[in-house]
Amino acid sequence: MRERPAKVVVRLEVNGDRHQLAVEPRTTLLEALRYELGLTGSKQGCDKGDCGACTVLVDGRPVLSCLTLAIEAEGRRITTIEGLAKGGKVHPVQDAFDLSGALQCGFCQPGMMLSAAALLERTPKPTRREIKEALSGNLCRCTGYKQIIDAVELASAQRALPERDERPTTGASREG
Ligand code: FES
Ligand code: FES
């Protein structure tokens, strides 16, 4: 019987929290996130780079965590869907997916939303073509893609608005 390889210590920064894990060198980032850290938002779909369900952000860029070793992510900034909302506020992409009905079973959504959030960081006003390109590695078997692309456009528009409590009031009263 083959011996299991010796474990190595890997330090990961995930959603702003630092972790130190002992894992086999072949452990993927996806396995470390899901099975060592309990962050199950990143989905294990095909496990071979075809579906995008495992997408996370590494230093702000979308990465397939099923094709990335945990040790490769050491010293990098990892964001999973659990870290997309900040300070108790959902990310505009999460809000827009909800408002646009771009959700059904939800399996593709964590990866889809992270790819979309990364796109809006680098291209705040993307064209529909740019949205399609940015999401081309994320497959959805349920919704069709129109609502998803609509959602990213809506998120782009929402990001351009001031925060709700900073928006100017019209002065008009609803009463009376
Ligand atoms: S699970 Fe990683 S691409 Fe499908
Ligand atoms: S909502 Fe089911 S795979 Fe996309």
Image (cartoon, helix red, strand yellow):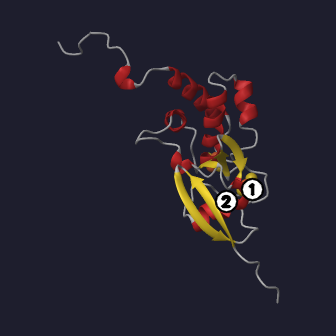
Q: Quadrant of the C terminus?
A: top left
Q: Is residue 19 left or right of residue 5?
A: left
Dot 1 crowding, Cα within 10 Å, few <14, some 14–19, many 20+: some
Q: The residue tagged with tag 2: helix, strand or loop? A: helix
Q: Is residue 27 left or right of residue 33?
A: right
Gap between marks 1 and 2 measured at Cα: 8 Å
Name the residue furthest right: 2
Of residues 104 and 72, the one drawn nearer to the viewer in this rendering: 72
Give above or below for 127 relative to 70: above
Q: Is mark 2 within 8 Å of ligand 1?
A: yes
Q: Is residue 26 left or right of residue 22?
A: right
Q: Quadrant of the N terminus?
A: bottom right
CB atoms of marks 1 and 2 within 8 Å? yes
Residue 28, x across and y down, in percent: 72, 62
Q: The residue tagged with tag 1: helix, strand or loop? A: loop
Name the residue furthest bottom: 1
Q: Name the residue: 52% across, 47% down.
A: 83
Q: Earlier in the sequence, mark 1 or mark 2?
A: 2
Q: Name the residue: 77% across, 56% down.
A: 67
Of residues 172 and 8, the one drawn nearer to the viewer in this rendering: 8
Dot 2 crowding, Cα within 10 Å, few <14, some 14–19, many 20+: many
Residue 88, x across and y down, in percent: 40, 42
Q: Amino acid at mark 1?
A: Thr
Residue under label 1, please give it. Answer: 68
Residue under label 2, please give it. Answer: 30
Q: Name the residue: 75% across, 56% down.
A: 68
Q: Which numbered tag is attached to residue 57?
A: none
Give above or below for 20 relative to 55: below
